[in-house]
Image (tube, grey):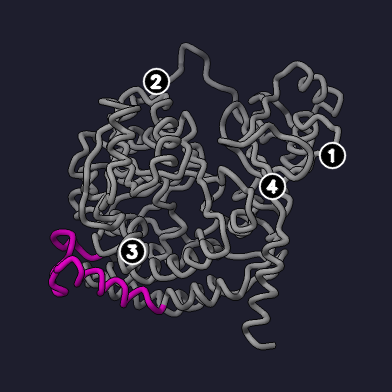
């Protein structure tokens, strides 16, 4: 079959994908998930102990498919795809399905007595940076959610990147006043905008999110608390879930992992490389995403910030967040992922969006690797030692995938979650958008080809971006060189 008819068939199959509701279900922390029997569970439901809420900006849940975030006592523990029969009560039905698929609550040790309770250190003063460009409607939703955070001490800086109108400035002056600082960065590029935000930040920690997210009320507290607990921590990333699954593009992306990295907290230490990550630290898509990340400000400044020749808005198309993750790891600092720090992301909506996203993520991946080697030649031996496995990973990353096929982390356009129960609900996730065990929709080969083309283009795009910034190729674009990265025990 020629390529054109095959692509048309893929698009027709893509367009047949129906919408999915988004909601969150909060089960009581003491809930034994059905261990007391179905009648007890129904009694608890009747007592209003289970809360069902629609996702951000979504209507109340009705019959049909539901992408469900399950919480236990307010803490995210997993996602699943539920189904509500017509005429049934959504809260009761989804609570039963969540208990069935989660299984019994894991046994935990008893909490300490009040007299022995250890106080937790205060969260650090934090600057939240949002880079934006001509998306005032989305930005307003993001800012509203940030101003509702329960973090006790933070500021918000909006970096208006290469604006063509005064819309963003007027929004902030009219609606937010002194609660939000507005800064203009005339040079286009996400990394340039983020670096401008870092220079303006007063916080001990600098957190970054996008203008197309809605932050959970505890997002900033959960994202910054690990810094207070671990002085050697330089970066923390968090959980990203879909705000809406109304279009085929949004459902397809989330079916293949989206941006989520699972529900198991994890710390990455360059002096104790993870045995299950043979590409560490270069497979940076596993660590997190730029829509939900925070850095210790002095560490980020010491490594030179983000490479301005990477990121959306430059010829490199992306890779700025991945570059930042590896830079702090290469400097000997730890990185932590926590699923408790949650933002809801508005995925792109059309087939054309997915095509652009697939190409852009491929380009960003190899652009960030090029940036590392240009700016930090000392990383070359470690990179070459991992190259054979990296090429095999790239083939898997860009392969066309049928429905039901398991995939590695990062296989989807968004750099999806690691397959397995720890990435979905805590036990036995149903194949679903968000389940991450099994894919319910085939990944079009057209998108895989575009991702491969993007990967071939990425180094060229990065070098073009450097020339556009008028930075000499032989000099680091973001600061002085740091020392070599050599994992203990040599290359793995």
Q: Which residues are magenta?
A: 456-484
Q: Which residue is mark 1?
A: 85
- Kindly indicate whether the residue at mark 2 contacts the one at mark 1 (C-beta within 8 angstroms): no
Task: For marks 1 and 2, give the one nearer the viewer.
Answer: 1
Query: Which of the 4 image quarters holds residue 296?
Result: top left
Query: Which of marks 3 and 1 precedes in the sequence?
Result: 1
Looking at marks 4 and 1 on the same chain, the residue that comes earlier in the sequence is marked by 4
Q: Nearer the viewer, mark 3 or mark 4?
A: 4
State whether residue 323 is above or below residue 19. below
* Residue occupying the point 14% across, 68% down: 471
- Residue 51: give x, y in percent of width and height: 67, 25
Q: Earlier in the sequence, mark 1 or mark 2?
A: 1
The numbered mark at residue 487 is 3
Circles 3, 4 touching at the beta carbon (< 8 Å): no
In this view of the protein, can residue 417 be seen by the observer?
no
Residue 462 sits inside the magenta stretch: yes
Provide residue 369's location: percent of width, then percent of height.
33, 69
Instruction: Name the one closer to the observer, 274 or 391.
Output: 391
């Amino acid at each position: 079959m020629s390529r054109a008819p095959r692509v048309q068939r893929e698009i027709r199959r893509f367009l047949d994908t129906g919408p999915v509701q988004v909601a969150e279900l909060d089960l009581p922390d003491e809930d034994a998930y059905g261990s007391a029997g179905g009648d007890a569970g129904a009694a608890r439901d009747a007592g209003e102990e289970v809360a069902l809420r629609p996702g951000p900006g979504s209507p109340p849940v009705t019959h049909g498919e539901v992408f469900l975030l399950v919480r236990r006592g307010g803490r995210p523990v997993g996602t699943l795809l539920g189904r509500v029969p017509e005429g049934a009560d959504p809260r009761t039905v989804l609570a039963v399905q969540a208990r069935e698929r989660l299984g019994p609550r894991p046994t935990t040790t008893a909490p300490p007595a009040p007299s022995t309770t250890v106080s937790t250190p205060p969260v650090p003063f934090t600057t939240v940076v949002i880079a934006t460009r001509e998306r005032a409607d989305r930005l307003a939703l993001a800012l509203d959610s940030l101003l509702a955070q329960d973090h006790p001490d933070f500021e918000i800086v909006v970096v208006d990147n290469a604006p063509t109108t005064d819309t963003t400035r007027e929004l902030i002056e009219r609606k937010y006043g002194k609660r939000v600082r507005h800064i203009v960065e005339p040079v286009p590029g996400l990394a340039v905008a983020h670096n401008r935000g870092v220079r303006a930040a007063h916080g001990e920690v600098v957190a970054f999110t996008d203008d197309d997210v809605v932050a959970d009320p505890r997002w900033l507290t959960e994202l910054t608390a690990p810094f207070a607990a671990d002085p050697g921590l330089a970066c923390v990333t968090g959980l990203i879930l879909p705000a809406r699954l109304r279009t085929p593009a949004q459902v397809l992306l989330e079916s293949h992992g989206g941006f989520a990295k699972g529900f198991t907290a994890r710390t990455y230490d360059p002096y104790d490389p993870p045995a299950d990550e043979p590409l560490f630290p270069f497979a940076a898509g596993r660590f997190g995403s730029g829509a939900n990340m925070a850095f210790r400000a002095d560490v980020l400044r010491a490594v030179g910030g983000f490479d301005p020749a990477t990121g959306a808005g430059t010829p490199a198309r992306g890779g700025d967040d991945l570059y930042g993750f590896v830079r702090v790891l290469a400097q000997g600092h730890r990185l932590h992922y926590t699923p408790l720090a949650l933002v809801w992301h508005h995925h792109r909506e059309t087939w054309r969006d997915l095509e652009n996203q697939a190409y852009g993520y491929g380009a960003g991946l190899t652009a960030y690797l090029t940036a590392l080697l240009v700016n930090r030649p000392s990383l070359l031996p470690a990179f070459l030692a991992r190259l054979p496995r990296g090429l095999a990973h790239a083939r898997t990353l860009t392969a066309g995938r049928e429905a039901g096929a398991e995939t590695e982390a990062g296989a989807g356009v968004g750099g999806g979650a690691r397959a397995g129960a720890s990435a979905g609900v805590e036990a036995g996730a149903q194949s679903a958008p968000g389940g991450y065990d099994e894919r319910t929709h085939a990944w079009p080969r057209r998108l895989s080809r575009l991702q491969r083309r993007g990967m071939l283009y990425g180094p060229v795009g990065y070098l073009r971006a450097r020339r556009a910034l008028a930075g000499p190729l032989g000099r680091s674009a973001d600061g002085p060189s740091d020392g070599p990265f050599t994992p203990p025990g040599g290359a793995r």
